[in-house]
Amino acid sequence: QQSWLEYINAFENFVDRSNVDIKFYHLDVDINIDTPFIRGSVLCRFTSQIDNLQSLTLDLHRSFTLDEIEGEVSDYQFSDDTLRIEFNRTYNAGEEAEVTINYHGVPPLAEGVKGLRYENHGNDPVIASLSTPFLAHMWWPCKEGPGDKPDSVYVDVTIPDTSFSGIPVIAVSNGVLEEIVVE
């Protein structure tokens, strides 16, 4: 209930975002272990639900810095946790398109506990995400809420090749592990 109240308060000026159907995200995030900091890239593939679609609105916490937005993009505005991406062309109903958002920053926590958490258990770091359907924007750009679930999501996590207390650091995510690359 508290998360729902946070969502309502955060989106008092809610903009109807049913003009697109999110199909796929590819989240590629580089996580710093020593201090809270991430650098990420999110590919967002979507289908227009209307004719003459001119923009896409996503959620991302205002504490992040946008590095670049790739795709058929002419401009963007980023304020108050809302990223509005303007296209350099229009899309008609049923057309699929994609954008890639490159960003970095220190992920904040909602209520001090929700989002991408950096903690220590003893001397060992633990970094974990705790997101309801409304708080993923605390660490990656997305269309918040349970009303539009993507068909699939790929998650790539880059971490340093290191260990703590003799135990190697590993990255874990939902889904099927496809590959581990050690550089």
Image: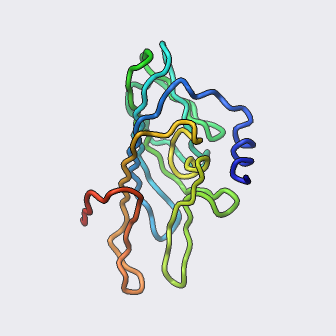
* Residue at x 48%, y 30% (from the top left corner): 21
Q: Is residue 132 left or right of residue 125?
A: right
Task: Reply above or below: 156 against 96.
Answer: below
Task: Reply above or below: 50 against 24.
Answer: above
Give coordinates of residue 7: x percent, y percent.
Answer: 69, 44
Residue 84 found in image quarter: top right
* Residue at x 56%, y 64% (from the top left corner): 117
Task: Give the camera-side residue of 156 and 108.
Answer: 156
Q: Is residue 183 left or right of residue 29?
A: left
* Residue at x 56%, y 35% (from the top left corner): 83
Task: Give the camera-side residue of 10 and 175.
Answer: 175
Count of labels shown? Answer: 0
Give coordinates of residue 96: x percent, y percent.
Answer: 38, 25
Give coordinates of residue 65: x percent, y percent.
Answer: 53, 45
* Residue at x 73%, y 54% (from the top left corner): 2
Task: Reply above or below: 45 against 89.
Answer: below
Q: Is residue 178 left or right of residue 75?
A: left
Q: How is the image coloured?
A: rainbow
Give coordinates of residue 163: x percent, y percent.
Answer: 37, 79
Q: Quadrant of the C terminus?
A: bottom left
Q: Is residue 45 left or right of residue 49?
A: left
Residue 68 found in image quarter: top left
